[in-house]
Amino acid sequence: MTQTAQREAQSGQDVLGGVTEFVTFNVGGYMFGVPVLRVQDTLIPDRIATVPLAPPEVRGSINLRGRIVTVIDMRRRLGLSDAGRPAGNGMGVTVESGSELYTLLVDNVGDVITLPLHLREANPNTLDPLWRDLAGGTYRLEDRLMVVLEIDRLLDLRAKN
Amino acid sequence: MDDLLNEFLTETAENLSALDVELVKFERDPTDQAILGSIFRMMHTIKGTCGFLGLARLEKVAHAGENVLGKFRDGELQVSPEAVTIILRCIDRIRQLLAGLEETGSEPEIDSSDLIGQLNAVAQGQATPVAAPVATAPAAVSEPPPIVSDAGFPVAAELLLEVEMARGSGVQGATDAMIEAEMEAERQREVAKAAPAVVAPALAPAPVAVAPAAAPVAKAPVEQSSGDPKESALAAASIRVGVDVLENLMTLVSELVLTRNQLLQMVRGQDDSEFKVPLQRLSHITSDLQDGVMKTRMQPIGNAWSKLPRIVRDLAVETGKKIELQMLGAETELDRQVLELIKDPLTHMVRNSADHGLESPDQRRAAGKNEIGTITLRAYHEGGHIIIHIADDGRGLNVDRIRQKAVQNGLATEAEMDQMAERQILQFIFRPGFSTAEKVTSVSGRGVGMDVVRTNIEKIGGTIEMNSVASKGTSFTIKIPLTLAIVSALVVESFKERFAVPQINVVELVRTSPRSETRIEMINASPVLRLRNRLLPLVSLRKLLQQESTESFSDDELFIVVTQVGTYNFGIIVDRVFDTEEIVVKPVSPLLREIPFYAGNTILGDGSVIMILDPNGIAAAAGQIASAGKDDKQVAATSHEEERMSFLVFRAGASEFKAVPLALVARLEEIDVKTVERTRGRHVVQYRDHLMPLVPFDAGHQWKTEGKQPVLVFSEGDRSMGLVVDEIVDVVADVMKVELNTAESGLIGSAVIGGKAMDIIDVGNYLTRAYADWFAPEANHAAPATTRALRRALVVNHSPFVRDLLTPHLAGAGWHVTTASTGAEAQRLTESETVFGLVVTGLDTPGFDAVGFAQRLRGNPSWANSKLASIAEDSDDEETTELRNAGFDLCLSKADWANLVEELRALIADAASEAVAAQEAASAGPDTKVVRVRKRSSRGSRRSNAQKLAAE
């Protein structure tokens, strides 16, 4: 895959400056990354128990080895349509925030890639305000763009309104 | 040099450098309590650590210094420049000793007895050097605690000091045991302080004194100078365990419980399973283990309160106020972690109440209040929550000042303020930044850090509510979930999703279907259920959780979970009901915390995640109870909160609304007018194999010729009566407060219910129109002129019908009515300080010993003027005599309602006039037996006359 090539190309950068490893995933055709250190788990969610009256972004809860994890529907959170949503529940990227676990429901999970900090670029000014709030910069990869997501802001549903 | 000593030296060096700064300030202002406190703590720490490490010389110096500082701090000793100098010299000496210690690894040979002598002299408030120390047997020591090295244990020196101290404080002599106990206690306190409150099985034996040949036993009662023996015994019986160890244990037990449940579910239904017996054992052990682990985490809330009396006392002294702190429910247990988190907010709020909430004695006198201000702390459990109530009877919050300040701070505009209710304005004190503004606190009287208080409470998933009445006081209600509890819960299904309802709130389950007797009926879009001659308000879970937009009960079969919150009952409509399961309550995700209907979530035995419903939240959302704790039994017993009643509102006759207590209404019917028949000038209808008389509310009622006629059905036993009305409007819950009595028959009075003035009908009157012998027709009773519910009446009866029937009568006559359905409840209510002027008891109330009850009340002088009445199923002359001897003023029979109501009315009037008379002339003896000769109504039954005669 291209990401692998990317990583090989970038690996020489380690000595020069800080690097961050990202877990990448796709939602609605876009590529996103979250720092690997924040990720607890990637999984295919089995039974998602819906929670009536929950905000639309909250898909429900799952049981992750005895812990109750809130599932966030990333398409909803990013304001994307349901067009092209994979059959089934898709995949989940479980992250920790505060002492709580959240599973981000995404279309599919990609590779883990290592990217140097200095290549991270600020968000384009024209970015949709919703995304601008959630994005902590972008990377220009060889063939596509990867948006870095700020997990804590992502999970603060109140800030959105 | 060992690590421990190294650590000690580093720590002490840090402390001393901090002390340097403090000391400069201390010298400048020796009265500053905060500085003094921090110096004291440092000195104390040094002393304590020295004891551990066996540094006898250092400890002696520090101990002597601490004594002086302690007396400064407690105000027993005036701070004088000489004393300060000596303290400074003491610190210098500690430095010196430490320097030597660091160099050589052992204590330098510096004689400090002169300095210690001086310090002790100061501590005893005298300038002269102390008398020669009393010798004591140095061998008289018990086995020292394991941590202390044998060689360096500074027993003799310490003892010597203690003896000196004791003599100084007027103690004539003390046994070695006492001294030893005190030493031990002091050490234990050190340990306890370092590890606050971890209780576990005993390890260290209680300190035992040896040396029987030593000093003589003091005969005079000796006031121990310090150390509570009980406390030390408790501390000795505990070990330190890290909280994370317990936490981990708890998680494991939770998992074990879930696994056990899973196993049980697998075996269920297989009678011949070989696993059955061992599984049962496993189940028991798991339960015990669970209880045990839970206990390690639970602590009485009193632990968080222990410092409050002192704080309040100090504040009272400081501000010149008189304050009484009442603490109720200190034994209520809650999770240790939660306890730690609420400790500071609680302290803060009590301090606020004492400092700002309560007025000075002069102000209180001027306002006509008791000059002693009261702060009440009350804690109790309620449906998986712990409720903490903090109330003061002070001046209340200054709304105008808060409004002004909020506008000033730009939190809201004047225009917005005008739109706000007072309650909303008060909420501003929770705004961050608002409270820290200096002027608000001094003028409005409250606020520093209320935002912090709220944040802390919300952090643990709690809520805080506030109520303030000008010049009456302010109260806060904190509701905290018991987050780590394992509870038993009923699993239900609504719209294909499962939920858990805490078993503690579930009263019973009812199955309904459109075809059966029990079915859901609607009153203007509000579903209700007839349950044993009562109407139960219902809440549909589907609708509440917006699982479907429209409400329809066409389904074949529905279940109703009859739920109790406080004293309020309501039903939750669900699709299916499963088993009861033990569940581990896990807090809901922060993202879902704003939904009021969930108390938590949990993982079931089969691994699925479900939400736990919060009956309090559901009841509140259903608009039935206004605020938490209002209906709680404990509150009812101790406070004068008024009970809410549900009323059925209907229209009949004139256009204004009429209301009747919902509890009295057995059913609501719509009767086809064609089925109404007339017999002997009365309207009747065939109803459930009986003829039911129909009585129009309005005498001039125009009977329709076709269509449906709404009817309220009242029934007792197998007798029913239908009250014909024009329209059934609504069901509302409100406090029964009769505003205006009326002489008009058929009405009890008018009241404001749900914000509208309505007539409350006297059901009794209509019942008698249907059955002359049910209730004899009543004459126009002019109710006593006292319209305010100043006097309190208690109705004890197991039958809700009787209770609800009597309540309006009494309320209408100006009584404030409290009801009890069991003997135990009656007992509890009458044991509180409230004296009821009138008690009406039902003899067939379960667990109720009428004779004993009356004797007990009559034995209490404050009940001497109260009226006691009893109602029996049927009269029995022998029993009547016994009851009268026990102190009942009136014995009535339920079989004779006409007489009962009349007698009661007369008794009420008596009690009222007597209350007045008693005030006017306090001369009336407590034994004035009230047997009144009254012109009897000709309608009074023969039986009751005979009964009356027999009694007289």
Image (tube, coloured by chain):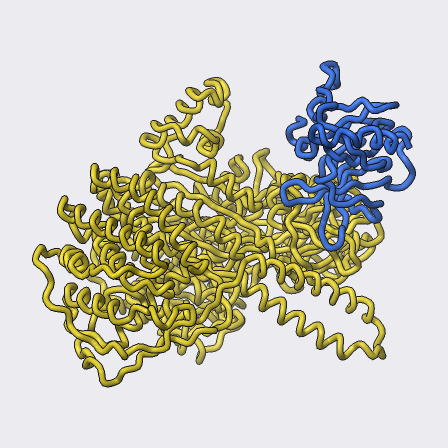
Q: Residue at x 74, y 23 (%)?
A: A119
Above or below B332: residue B440: above
Which of B41 and B647 lies nearest the eye of the viewer? B41
Looking at the image, the residue that sits furthest to the front is B104
In this rendering, would B451 be left or right of A141? left
Q: Quadrant of residue B580?
A: bottom right
Q: Quadrant of the N terminus of chain B?
A: bottom left
Please tell me how many numbered marks the rendered image carries: 0
Q: Quadrant of residue A11?
A: top right
In this rendering, would B766 be left or right of B136? right
Above or below B135: residue B690: above
Q: Colour of chain A?
A: blue
Position of residue B557 measured from the top left corner of the image (x, y, whole percent): 82, 54
What is the letter of the yellow chain? B
Q: Residue at x 48, y 18 (%)?
A: B413
Q: Residue at x 88, y 23 (%)?
A: A143
Q: Quadrant of the C terminus of chain B?
A: bottom left
Residue B679 visible in the current orientation: no
Position of residue A68 measured from the top left corner of the image (x, y, whole percent): 72, 49
In this rendering, would B722 be left or right of A27? left
Which of B594 and A99 lies nearest the eye of the viewer? A99
Position of residue B409 measured from the top left corner of the image (x, y, whole percent): 44, 22
